[in-house]
Structures are given as C-alpha cells and as structure tokens.
Image (cartoon, rainbow, N blue to C red):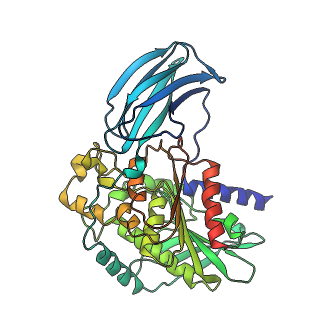
Amino acid sequence: MLRKIILGLVSVFVALNLTFAQPTEKFIKVIVAADHTDWTYKVGEKAKFTVSVLQNGNPIKNAKIRYEIGPEKMEPTKKETITLSTGTQTLEAGTMTAAGFLRCVAIAEIDGKEYRNLATAGFSPLEIQPTVANPADFDTFWSEAKTELAKIPLDSKMTLLPERCTEKVNVYQVNIQNFAVGTRLYGILCVPKKEGKYPALLQVPGAGVRPYAGDIANAEKGIITLQIGIHGIPVNLDPQVYADLGRGILNGYPNYNLDDKNRFFYKRVYMGCVRANDFLVSLPQFDGKNLAVTGGSQGGALSIVTAALDSRVKWLGAFYPAISDVTGYLNGRAGGWPHYFDKNSRAINEKKEKIETVAYYDVVNFARRLTQPGIYSWGYNDETCPPTSMYASYNVIKAPKELFLALETGHWTYPEQQEKVTNWLVGKLKE
C-alpha cells in the first residue's frame, strides 16, 4: 500500500513539474469561441467570437457580460457591457493587419460571482517573425561558456532513495558540480534495475522553486530519466523550504543580473542543463547514443536551449516555451514570459544593457540553431506564454518539427497533449 501511495505521489509530481494543472470545472460556464473551427485566419480576414453563458449545459437568458477584444497582452481596442437575451451572442472582432493574435475575454456576473473565459484568433501565425536581435558573437559566447564548463570536474554523487525505488527502477538523488567549482546541480535520477544499456531522457523544470520526485513511469519503460532543479539546492527537502525560498531570496530570480550577459541568472541554468547531459552520458547504463530533453514553460525554453547547445541531444519535446521573443513588447506586440518589457516592467528593464543581454538568452536565437527533430505543443489561449512569442521561435526552426495544437488551452495541458509528446519521445528513444 505504501508503495502505491508513493508511486501515486510521484505521478502527481511529474505532472506538476512539467505543466500547470488543467483548470477545475465551474458551476457556471462561459464559453468563448472563434467562428473558424481552427481559430485561424489570414491577415485582413474578419473574425467573430461567439460568447455563451451556460448552466447545466443550457444558456442562461439575460446573462450580463462585459467583454474586451484586442491583440493579446495589449490594451483592448473594444470594450463593452451587454446583456445576452438568449444566453449567447456573436461579436464582431474585426481583423489584424499583421500576423498575430486577437483575443476576446468575456466575464459574466451571475448572483454576484464572476466567471471568466477567453478565445484567441490567430492571424497567419506561421508568418510571425521574431523581434529580438541575433548577436553576431552569439555562437562564440556560448562556445566559450561550454569550454569553461568542460574544465569543471563533474564530481557526481548519487544517493539511493530506497523508499522511492520500485521493483523495476532504482531512484537516486544526484548531486553534480555545475558551472563553477563549488556550485551544485541537484536532480532525481531513475534507472532501470535490469542489466543493459538504455536511452536517456532529461526533464527540465518549469519556473518556480519546488521539490522533485523523478519520472519512474518512463524509467519502467526502459528509459533512464533525470529530472533536475535549477537553483543549486537539494530537490527532496520539506516543501515548506521551497515555499520560503520562492517568497524570499529566489523571488524574481529570472531578473537577476539582467544587465550583465556574463552574470545573468540563466547562464548558470543553461550550462546546468548541459552539465546534466554530461552526467547522463557518463552513466554505464546509458546506451551511448539516444538522448532526449523535454519540459514545459521555462522547461519548454530549456528544452530548446539544451538541444541547441548540445549535439548529444537527438530529440526534444517542448510545451509552451517561455523566454521567447521577449522584446515583442518593445515592438508593439506581446513578448514572452517573464515579460521583461511589458507595461509593468518597462520602466525598470528598458535599458540598453538589459536589452542586449536578453538577445543572448532568448529562445528564438537557440531555435534558429536547432538541428534535432522536435515536437511542440501549446494553445492559443495561453496568457503566460503568449502564442505570438512561441510562434516567433517556432517559425525560425529549420529542423524537422511537429506542432500539436490544443487551441483552447492556456498555460496548462490536456492529457492528450501529454500522451502525444511522451509517446513521440518514447518512440524515438526506443527505436
């Protein structure tokens, strides 16, 4: 029974580490939908949104809503409060004159409680081009960083976690020397017990500070899995430790040293992902050739970055990648998480040194350099990682690529998305 409980918790942790949970069902449902079934239009084509307010599957007559329509993450171009006499109404949304996304947000107030939903129309999304600069010395900068990393001894340590092991898998906390002597990278390693050589899957984390439990499920399929943290602290401590750090010293970590490309926080993170691969390929159980990387949000960004920096990676799977075309806001459109230059951060971050730094770390410039096949998945309704920013990265990828869209998803995934990407990766690794 204890083993089943632990495995159940592991499954929960795996899901939470990759993505945010699917929203819970509401008593009153606001449904917003674009009038094209694929929510996609050509530039200049007019879009419409239908808003419905439902209870028990039936329209609520005379429901009062307020709505706004405009380019995602920008000021709305249309606002109105209306009453839906039949419980549903179609709204004229207009069009866009350049490739991008137009969003309709509707809020209904029923019995003093608000219910919100949205839909987003894409206009020629495959034509979206990035705004971020592509530094002339980008490749030199990262080549030198990897050369310096290679000089640092791996000094890996593995601690067996007997309470997490299963009949088929050994589970360890690993502790690896990172980008400088004395700095550490922690993660949870799952290795099949049966003697043999196995492919490996690196799982890189979404934003935040949390513990990790390891991916036992895929390890039981015959894959070495390594789930890493990025903050240089053990990943199996009391959850309260991470909550305290997240509200304390690590609050706002994506902004640390943003004005210095050599000291910016994500340099250690990107190098840590390469170092994690150094460890994986050093394992005697590794088959010597089959290595993949996957993650969502910040982890989606790190999946692309890791593959671009490390040719040992053969495949990648990325859910809604963050840190993509973050300078979009400086060009009148949505930029990627962590929204360095949006209206709330511009006064602080719109400095020459910071704009120059992000060009070395923006996912767009790693996507340009990808050579590995990859599978990607996101939705049009993502308010954390705007689809404009994600397409800016996706559209410059020249390597083989596959995009699995779940249009109405925000910063979360359906089980079908998880299954699609996981099955694709496992299939490649086990070929």
Side of 175 where 322 appears, left or right: left
Q: Position of residue 9 (x, y in %)?
A: 68, 56
- The structure residue drawn at horizontal position 57% and vertical position 48%, both measured from the top left corner, is 413
The C terminus - image quarter: bottom right
- Residue 282 vs 403, above or below: the answer is below
Q: Check the image and report above or below for 144 versus 221.
A: below
User: For the point 35% across and 45% down, which residue is it?
Assistant: 99
Q: Nearer the viewer, residue 244 or 70?
A: 70
The x and y percentages for residue 119 are 48, 35
Residue 331 as seen in the image, left or right of residue 418: left
State the image quarter where residue 6 is shown: bottom right
Q: 22 or 94: nearer the eye?
A: 94
Between 331 and 300, the residue placed more toward the observer is: 331
Total count of labels = 0
Position of 386 relative to 263 (above/below): above
Residue at left offset 43%, top offset 16%? 82
- Residue 206: horizontal and vertical position, in percent? 49, 57
